[in-house]
Structure formats: structure tokens, C-alpha cells
Image (cartoon, rainbow, N blue to C red):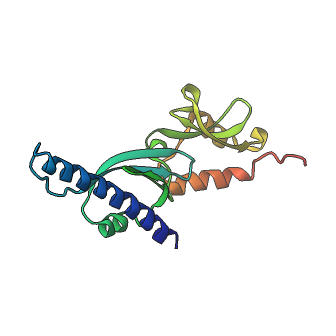
Amino acid sequence: MRAALVFILLLGLLVGKAVQEHDQVQAMQLSNEAPAVAEQPLELTVHLKRVYLDGEESEEVVKELVFALEDFWAKYESWQLVDMDEDRLIFKKKVDDISPLLKMNGYFGITNDGTLSIFNGKPEESDVIQSFFQIDVKKLESSQHMRLMQGIPVKSKEEYAKVVESMKKYSIKKAK
């Protein structure tokens, strides 16, 4: 139902734009200013926003030449349309993976107050990207504590989930 409504809205915008272009061509023909212009495909700016499991967002902007609406909508059927105007559409998609930033430069570590966090680079020299929960550092084995101090690289979604899950048992429970 929603896809049909969006299709109708975009179709209305396209028809309106086509009528406007047709009127301009017709006016130019009547005034003999320029020869008739063949119909051209619609050019749209498409913003593709991706939201990753770790909360990071990325945006890609592409120019699309639309020859057929059916083909255009088929290309973006797995995306959610969040905004549009006559020559720009914004789509959003949740990605079931960690962000490329984390895969390239993310490290698990702990902050000075013992909060399990992901840093953009090694913990001692970088900014926190994401924080999880406070850890009771006294309960950690010395090797686990040392690994967190040095930084545990985040290379995949599986490693991300494994580290978070393994550290939950050391979390400090907040009193309600």
C-alpha cells in the first residue's frame, strides 16, 4: 500500500515536470526561438543512507537517469523512502553488519571509569565511537584486562557480538 502511494506521488511529480517541459518546448516552437527537443529521461539525485549495527551511518549520493519508473523502483525496492521532492529522493536501509569504519579502525577497550567502549584506533590514543556498559574491572582476569587496555580489534560482526556478549558477565548491575 505504501509503495503504491509513493509511486503515485512520484508519478504525479514526474507528470507535472513533463507537462512543464512540454509547455516550455511548445512555447519555444511557437516563438521560433529553438527547434523541438526530444523527451529526455528524468535526472534524480538519490541519497542512500545506511545505518549499521554499531550506530554508524553512511550516506552515498548518486545521480540516476530514470527512463522507466518500474525499473527505478525495482532497483531500490529493498530501501525505505524517507523523503522526496521533485528531483531528489532519500532512501534509508538498516544494514545487518558493523560499519566499514569499525572494520578498519575499531578497537574494543575500556575507558578510565571502566566502561566497555569501541575506539577509533587503539584505546590509549583515540576517541570513543560507541559505549556499552560499565565493567567491574576487579572481576576480569589480568589477561582480559590487559587485552582491553591494549585494544581488541573489531574485524567482523561475529567478533563484535562475541566480545560484547563475553563482557556482559562482568558488567556492573545498576540498582533500580
Q: Farthest residue in the front direction?
A: 30
How many tags in the picture? 0
Toward which corner of the image does residue 12 lie, by quadrant?
Answer: bottom left
> Residue at point 35% right, 68% down?
74
Decide: is 3 above or below 105: below
Q: Position of residue 55 (x, y in %)?
A: 57, 47
Q: Farthest residue in the right direction?
A: 176
Whether residue 175 sits left or right of residue 147 in the image: it is right
Q: Nearer the viewer, residue 89 or 154?
A: 89
> Residue at point 35% right, 57% down?
16
> Residue at point 20% right, 49% down?
27
> Residue at point 72% right, 52% down?
168
Q: Nearer the viewer, residue 151 or 88?
A: 88
Q: Position of residue 129 (x, y in %)?
A: 58, 37
Decide: is 134 above or below 29: above
Residue 103 seen in render = no
Residue 174 seen in render = yes
Q: Position of residue 60 (x, y in %)?
A: 38, 46
Decide: is 133 above or below 9: above
Q: Farthest residue in the top direction?
A: 125
Whether residue 85 sits left or right of residue 75 in the image: it is right
Q: Position of residue 145 (x, y in %)?
A: 66, 39
Q: Nearer the viewer, residue 54 or 146?
A: 54
